[in-house]
């Protein structure tokens, strides 16, 4: 049986203006973005530690 090597997809560099066009947010200093809330699973994991 031959060894098969998987192909890797290489990401191309993207500038901030392109990112803004994709997600509609300001690249730097957007204060309206809220921090991600912990899910119930994360809270349960923290209690186990």
Image: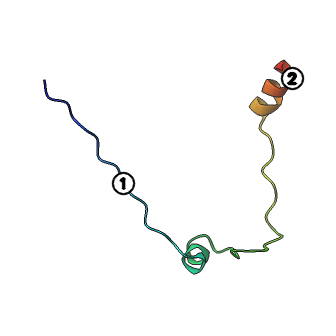
Which residue is tagged 1? 9
In which quadrant of the rendered image does the C terminus lie?
Answer: top right
Crowd rating for badge 1 (residues with CA inside 10 Å; few <14, some 14–19, many 20+): few
Q: Quadrant of residue 29?
A: bottom right
Residue 25 vertical placement versus 44 (above, below): below
Q: In the visual, does 20 lie left or right of 39?
A: left
- Please identify the quadrant where the N terminus is shown: top left
Q: Residue at x 28, y 41 (%)?
A: 6
Q: Residue furthest bottom?
A: 17
Residue at figure coordinates x 58%, y 73% from the top left? 19
Question: In the rendered image, which residue does mark 2 sit on?
Answer: 47
Q: Residue drawn at (83%, 70%), measured in percent from left and top? A: 31
Earlier residue among tags 1 and 2: 1
Please provide percent x and percent y for residue 27. 68, 74
Q: Is residue 10 left or right of residue 31?
A: left
Which SS class for mark 2? helix
Q: Position of residue 20 (x, y in %)?
A: 61, 76
**Residue at screen point 58% across, 80% down:** 17
Q: Secondary structure at mark 1?
A: loop
- Please state which of residues 2 and 39 is positioned toward the viewer in this rendering: 2
Tell which tag, 1 or 2, sits nearer the viewer.
Answer: 1
Residue 5 percent location from the top left of the image: 25, 38
């Amino acid at each position: 049986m031959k060894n098969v090597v998987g192909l890797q997809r290489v990401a191309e560099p993207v500038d901030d203006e392109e990112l803004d066009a994709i997600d509609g947010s300001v690249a730097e200093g957007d204060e309206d973005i809220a921090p991600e809330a912990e899910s119930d699973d994360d809270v349960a994991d923290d209690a186990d530690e």
